[in-house]
């Protein structure tokens, strides 16, 4: 045995003796003061080993006639049953040890088992396959720990909060078969420890995120419910209401929210490729619903509404941010039907196709949405335009452009707030009468 190791053990025993002469501690709370020593040991085992070494030290000193009965008495009073038993054998006097200064003697294996069983009940209620344990400790308990840390310079100490999280988490994983997840758990279980070591448990069920695409096959369907200032719904259905009606009940969730890669105007259809989106199912009770079961519910509802939505797979919270941010970068193809009160000539259409070839367009916030958006200017690009004449005053155009370009304003110019515009190029008033999103690039 090396002299360095012997010196370390001697130091731990001497410091423990000094602490226990003044402060009652259970084996677990004593072991936690020296948590950095002894890999693979629990704090309970570490504390028992220290107390065993103390009992050996005391007996050796007693055998040599070097012991102090007063010190032995205080160690027995503050050190628990093991040291009290040693005192009884030497002096024949029974002692009832004091309760632990930090936990009151309540941080035991049975306590951990009890808390973990209740946590498991919560996880089963939430259909959770992964979890994270959080612990909130009363500030009086934390103050007691801090007192010891400062008074005895305990650099090797582990907090009771950290040990509670670890031990409860291990037991929950063992008892429930659920997997600890420190980044994206299904459910966060929070154990609140009061100063007398009574406790309460709360939980937070994290959302389920699912990727998908939707197609809006009719017009006058808003993205989210559109409530007028007078408190009435302006449109009978929205994409979000459609998704909520289909999925809220099967997941038994508090709410369902959609996060799409942009959004089309309420009077525009979303056809062709469909629009990517992430569905966020908030506080679900049922988490293990299969994608096919969810798609079946959506297909059933599509019989009543001109909306189609297909889910692909489970995803993460970060995908929500990615999809929304990427909306500005995804190029799109629009189909727009345009009317002019003046006759449209074939050369006008040729001119539009030639002019809007990789053309930069500057747009200020459209007048139609200035009441809810700040007046800003942005620059977008139109990459290509293809046009078919329908009649003398109507034509259809496919417009390939940057995401976020205001297509209606590209047609009529919005009183000069969009430059250049179709109307400016042909020198005639133009009115978009139908708009469809045909493609959202991946």
Image: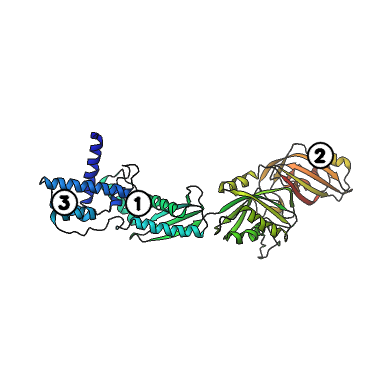
Asked whether, in this view, residue 104 is left or right of residue 164, the answer is left
Q: Which residue is mark 2?
A: 353
Q: Secondary structure at mark 1?
A: helix
If the image is split into quadrants, where does the C terminus sit? top right
Q: Do the CB atoms of the residues marked 3 and 1 lie less than 8 Å apart?
A: no
The residue furthest left is 65
Q: Secondary structure at mark 2?
A: helix
Q: Residue at 65% of width from left, 44% of height from top?
A: 328
Q: Do the CB atoms of the residues marked 2 and 1 lie less than 8 Å apart?
A: no
Q: Which residue is mark 1?
A: 160
Q: Which residue is mark 3?
A: 71
Query: In front: 384, or 258?
Result: 258
Mark earlier in primary sequence (3, 1): 3
Residue 421 appears anywhere in the view: no
Q: Secondary structure at mark 3?
A: helix
Query: In front: 228, or 298?
Result: 298
Tell me residue 209's x, y (percent): 58, 51
Asked whether, in this view, residue 403 is left or right of residue 105, the answer is right
Q: Residues within 10 Å of mark 1 (few under 14, many from 20)?
A: many
Tell me residue 194's x, y (percent): 36, 59
Query: In front: 173, or 425?
Result: 173
Residue 344 appears anywhere in the view: yes
Q: Residue at 85% of width from left, 39% of height from top?
A: 350
Number of disc labels: 3
Q: Residue 207 is drawn in which quadrant?
A: bottom right
If the image is split into quadrants, where does the N terminus sit? top left
Q: Residue at 60% of width from left, 60% of height from top?
A: 250
Q: In 3D space, how far apart are the residues under numbered discs 2 and 1 (Cα atoms)?
A: 72 Å
């Amino acid at each position: 045995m090396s002299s360095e190791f012997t010196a370390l053990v001697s130091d731990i025993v001497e410091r423990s003796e000094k602490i226990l002469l003044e402060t009652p501690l259970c084996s677990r709370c004593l072991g936690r003061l020296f948590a950095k020593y002894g890999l693979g040991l629990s704090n309970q085992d570490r504390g028992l080993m220290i107390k065993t070494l103390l009992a050996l030290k005391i007996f050796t000193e007693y055998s040599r006639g070097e012991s102090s009965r007063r010190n032995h008495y205080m160690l027995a009073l503050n050190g628990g049953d093991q040291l009290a038993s040693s005192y009884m054998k030497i002096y024949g006097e029974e002692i009832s040890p004091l309760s632990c200064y930090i936990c009151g003697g309540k941080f035991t294996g049975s306590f951990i088992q009890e808390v973990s069983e209740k946590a498991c009940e919560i996880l089963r209620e939430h259909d959770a396959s992964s979890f994270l344990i959080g612990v909130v400790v009363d500030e009086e308990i934390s103050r007691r720990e801090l007192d010891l840390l400062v008074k005895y310079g305990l650099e090797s100490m582990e907090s009771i909060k950290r040990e509670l999280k670890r031990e409860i988490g291990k037991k929950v994983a063992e008892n429930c078969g659920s997997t600890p997840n420190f980044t994206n758990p299904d459910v966060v279980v929070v154990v609140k420890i009061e100063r007398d070591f009574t406790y309460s448990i709360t939980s937070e069920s994290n959302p389920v995120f699912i990727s998908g695409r939707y197609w809006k096959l009719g017009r006058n369907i808003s993205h989210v419910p559109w409530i007028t200032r007078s408190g009435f719904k302006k449109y009978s259905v929205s994409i979000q209401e459609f998704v909520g009606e289909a999925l809220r009940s099967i997941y038994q969730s508090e709410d369902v929210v959609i996060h799409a890669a942009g959004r089309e105007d309420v009077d525009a259809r979303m056809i062709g490729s469909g629009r990517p989106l992430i569905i966020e199912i908030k506080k679900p009770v049922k988490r293990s619903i299969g994608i096919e079961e969810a798609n079946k519910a959506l297909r059933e509802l599509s019989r009543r509404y001109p909306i189609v939505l297909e889910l692909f797979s489970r995803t993460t919270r970060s995908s929500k941010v990615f999809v929304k941010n990427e909306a500005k970068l995804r190029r799109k193809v629009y189909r727009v039907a345009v009317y002019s009160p003046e006759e449209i000539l074939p050369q006008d259409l040729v001119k539009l196709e030639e002019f809007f070839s990789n053309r930069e367009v500057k747009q200020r916030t459209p007048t139609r949405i200035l009441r809810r958006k700040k007046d800003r200017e942005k620059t977008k690009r139109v990459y290509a335009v293809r046009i078919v004449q329908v009649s003398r005053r109507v034509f259809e155009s496919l417009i390939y452009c940057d995401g976020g370009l205001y297509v209606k304003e590209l047609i009529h110019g919005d009183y000069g707030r969009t430059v250049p515009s179709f109307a400016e190029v042909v020198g005639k008033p133009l009115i978009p009468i139908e708009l469809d999103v045909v493609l959202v690039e991946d």
